Amino acid sequence: MDFIFPGFIPPEFGENGPWWFTFHQTPNLPESIVEGKERQYLSWFFKGLAYNPEAITDEEIDRYVSYYSSPGGMRAGFEYYRAFSQDAEDNKESAAKGKITMPVLVLSGDIYPALGGDFPGSTTLNSTQALAENVQGVIVPLQDTGFQKSSQTLYLTSYPNSLGIILMVLNKSTDSLKS
């Protein structure tokens, strides 16, 4: 998943990130609002934030809903966001002690529907560079931030002893190859 590290949210996202970051962090409120409406809520994220909403089937959404509508399921998902404040402190403290030195590959989508569509650059790459020294970024064409489902098959080839990367995208519907 293409995601921003807490503590290194780009300024264009605002201080706290997209609206749902703050909503999900609010104690108990999201659970009370979403209870009994898990399918509608999760469908909005899966379909509304996807580059290709049709790639996510109703059966797949039902599978997620079955997990999240079980006792404590949505709360567990919201707790992920509620940990952001501590995660941000920990990430900043870690970066201040020294950045990760091993090579890091970041794959990012080039479409951010939640931000109005085509959003320049890679927010994930930017936040990762705050934590690591040797970061290589690849923006995957015609892909959203979730990489849940796609009409493309991604082939990454990495060469030994380097960060030389070739990204080839095979479009399943046409079997055409892009690199």
Image (tube, rainbow, N blue to C red):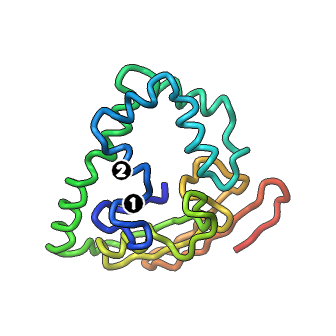
Measuring from the top left, give residue 169's x and y in whole percent: 69, 65
Residue position for label 1 = 17
Using a 10 Å C-alpha cutoff, classify the residue at mark 2 as few (fewer than 14 neighbours), some (14 to 19) or many (20 or more): few
Give the amino acid type for the residue marked by disc 1 in the picture. Answer: Gly
Badge 2 element: helix
Question: Which quarter of the rendered picture does the C terminus lie within?
Answer: bottom right
Using a 10 Å C-alpha cutoff, classify the residue at mark 1 as few (fewer than 14 neighbours), some (14 to 19) or many (20 or more): some
Measuring from the top left, give residue 28's x and y in whole percent: 30, 32
Residue position for label 2 = 22
Horizontal placement of 27 versus 78: left or right?
Answer: left
Q: Nearer the viewer, residue 72 or 169?
A: 72
At 39% across and 71% down in the image, what residue appears?
10
Q: Residue furthest right?
A: 174
Q: Are marks 1 and 2 in contact (CB under 8 Å)?
A: yes
Q: Quadrant of residue 6?
A: bottom left
At 74% across and 71% down in the image, what residue appears?
178
